[in-house]
Image: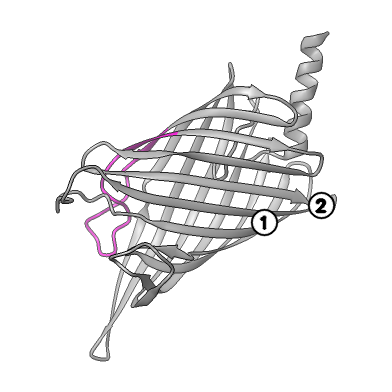
Amino acid sequence: MSGALRGLRRLGVLMLCGPMVAAHADPWVPTAGNGAFDFALRQYEATRVFLPGQYGTATLPGSELRYTMVRITGVQGLGGRLSLEYDLRAARVQKIRVHHHLRTVASATGVEDQEIGLNLALVQRAHFADSIALNVVAASGSTRSNPALGVGQSALEPDFQIGMAGRRWRVALKSGPRIFLDGGVAQLRAELDAETRVTDRIELGVELFYVRTVKLRSPLPVQDRSEPYDLLRPGVRLKYRVTAHLKPFIEYEQDVAGQGIHAGRRITLGVTYAY
């Protein structure tokens, strides 16, 4: 009887919090056969760059960078406290430079780097959960074109995830390093994601993504194609519950601090499907 009650409690957690797919922190691991995925279209645009020599909010005019990305991000319960996470992407990127009133446009189309991993549940309660994950970043994106569609290196990304939930809200944190297998770069990453149910159908979410690059050896060699990535990006998300399984959403994100990379904004339209 106690096992049945635990099962009902866990089911209640999943129904209450809604399936949080791998795009966001997800310490609640679905049971075998259950899962969810996001299908999204993302538009990014930037005309300024953060200063190359220091991390901060100051920017300078730079080349224009645009990309349109199709992204499928999801989680699949495997049983035995395990779930499969995946992040599959393809994009069209444009980089526009203006020099002496001459406009040059370079573009690239194809698959981006892909990510897949396993998430292991630790504590799984109605109001608290945590888990550990090991993700593999496959360097499937092309680096031969300008602009590149990937960094040209595979990486490992171990993460720790922790979350709390109430009757109409939940907060989750995901943090850990991304360690490139060939080269001298590791990135320290953290993502805070919070969501509240405003009405029975409308959910409002906010998120904060932070990443800093750690140079493991100095100076950084030219052949190390792992792009240094230093960024702080908040975002806001609005989700509408059509059915228990289908939730369209719109998300807006803005790069507010960084170092040596484009400072832009992105809008994402998509739909979450739970099964």
Q: Which residues are magenta?
A: 135-158
The stretch drawn in magenta includes residue 139? yes
Quarter the C terminus occupies: top right
Name the residue: 60% across, 29% down: 130
The spot of residue 182 in percent (x, y) is 22, 39
Please, what secondary structure does the residue beneath circle 1 have?
strand
Q: Is residue 23 left or right of residue 19?
A: left
Q: Can the viewer see residue 21? A: no
Instruction: For the N terminus, give its image quadrant.
Output: top right
**What is the secondary structure assignment of the residue under circle 2?**
loop
Report if residue 31 lies within the magenta region: no
Question: Disc 2 designates what residue?
Answer: 201
Residue 22, how many percent across, how many down?
55, 40
Q: Quadrant of residue 50?
A: bottom left
Is 188 or 118 nearer to us in this picture?
A: 188
Amino acid at dot 1: Phe
Residue at the disc numbered 1: 249
Q: Position of residue 31 (x, y in %)?
A: 65, 24
Q: Type of residue at label 2?
A: Arg
